[in-house]
């Protein structure tokens, strides 16, 4: 089946998560894909973090990026893994971020997790993730994180803070804290970046990959695309080998 024919708006249920103990009056819109017969299956779970341009409360923008998230999710839903994958796609509210640093810091490829506090959207996402793991038939050995741009930083953040939770991660044009590489050396990582990215410099990915290789990470892969700017996700998500690599990983 052609992935372009997949209708994510129909296939992914629309929900809003609220947790007054965390956020007060801030809520978290999210989309959830549940495969048929998920109750009887031990499903993989993919957590997807969108980029800054898809923030809001319409609960649609995070799955409607035709060159980014939409390709990723649709490719999964036409893959051999579609019947055993749960997809969770939260939407960060406007003017907030998945992680605390400013875009100016991201552009320099610098990040210090010791100075970061979990933002409310991130706290809500992690609380929601925990509830979904408990409520649905999720294989706790096959939980994955992926994200692009602002979501790429979020991906590095969650695997660094919770390395025992994730079986693998895909981070596109994002960055992490190289000083924490030892913490995530057992989390397989696939990093992507465009060489002409002038929003998040390619050194952001390179520093993480180099740091992971210095600590003998179990599986770290890195692809850079020449003549590609910040939207390197359109290249990354159309690589068929990415999905085989990701879904073969298990804790």
Image (cartoon, rainbow, N blue to C red):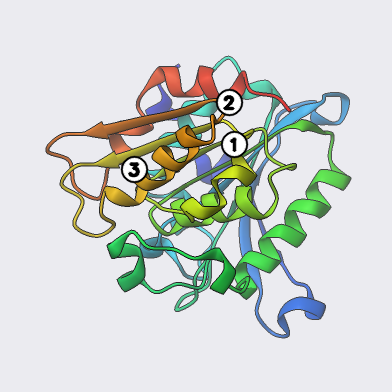
90 lies above or below 172? below
Q: Is residue 103 visible?
A: yes
Residue 191 percent across, percent down from the top left: 41, 37
Query: Do the residues under discs 3 and 1 have CB atoms within 8 angstroms?
Result: no
> Number of callouts in the render?
3
Residue 31 percent across, percent down from the top left: 61, 51
Spot the residue most to the left: 227
Q: Is residue 7 visible?
A: no
C-alpha span from label 3 to label 1 = 15 Å
Q: Which circle's residue, 2 or 3, is located before the other in the chain? A: 3
Q: Quadrant of the N terminus?
A: top left
Q: Which circle's residue, 3 or 1, is located before the other in the chain? A: 1
Q: Determine the image quadrant of residue 115.
A: bottom right
Q: Is residue 10 left or right of residue 153?
A: right
Residue situated in front as seen by the camera: 120 or 61: 120
Q: Which circle's residue, 1 or 2, is located before the other in the chain? A: 1
C-alpha span from label 2 to label 3 = 17 Å
Spot the residue most to the bottom: 24
- Residue beneath disc 3: 206
Q: Residue at x 54, y 27 (%)?
A: 77
Q: Is residue 182 left or right of residue 141?
A: left
- Residue beneath disc 2: 218
Classify mark 2: residues with Cα within 10 Å, few (<14), some (14-19) or many (20+). Answer: few
Q: Quadrant of the C terminus?
A: top right
Residue 160 percent across, percent down from the top left: 61, 51
Q: Which mark is residue 185?
A: 1
Q: Determine the image quadrant of residue 70.
A: top left
Q: Residue at x 84, y 34 (%)?
A: 137
Tag 2, which secondary structure? Answer: loop
C-alpha span from label 1 to label 2 = 6 Å
Q: Residue at x 63, y 23 (%)?
A: 249
Query: Do the residues under discs 1 and 2 have CB atoms within 8 angstroms?
Result: yes
């Amino acid at each position: 089946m052609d992935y372009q024919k997949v209708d994510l708006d129909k296939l992914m249920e629309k929900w809003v998560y609220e947790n007054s103990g965390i956020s007060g009056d801030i809520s978290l819109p999210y989309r959830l894909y549940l495969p048929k017969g998920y109750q009887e299956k031990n499903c993989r779970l993919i957590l997807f973090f969108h980029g800054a341009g898809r923030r809001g409360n319409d609960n649609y923008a995070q799955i409607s990026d035709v060159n980014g998230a939409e390709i990723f999710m649709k490719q999964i839903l036409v893959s051999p893994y579609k019947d055993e994958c749960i997809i969770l796609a939260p939407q960060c509210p406007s003017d907030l971020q998945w992680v605390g640093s400013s875009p100016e810091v991201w552009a320099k490829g610098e990040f210090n997790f010791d100075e970061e506090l979990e933002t409310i959207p991130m706290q809500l996402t992690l609380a929601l993730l925990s509830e979904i793991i408990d409520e649905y038939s999720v294989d706790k050995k096959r939980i994955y994180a992926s994200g692009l741009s602002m979501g790429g930083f979020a991906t590095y953040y969650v695997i660094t803070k919770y390395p025992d939770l994730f079986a693998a991660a895909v981070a596109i044009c994002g960055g992490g804290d190289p000083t924490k590489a030892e913490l995530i050396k057992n989390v397989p990582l696939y990093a992507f970046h465009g060489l002409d990215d002038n929003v998040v410099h390619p050194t952001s990915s390179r520093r993480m990959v180099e740091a992971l290789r210095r600590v003998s990470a179990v599986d770290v892969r890195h692809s850079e695309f020449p003549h590609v700017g910040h939207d390197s996700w359109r290249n990354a998500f159309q690589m068929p080998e990415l999905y085989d690599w990701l879904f073969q990983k298990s804790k």
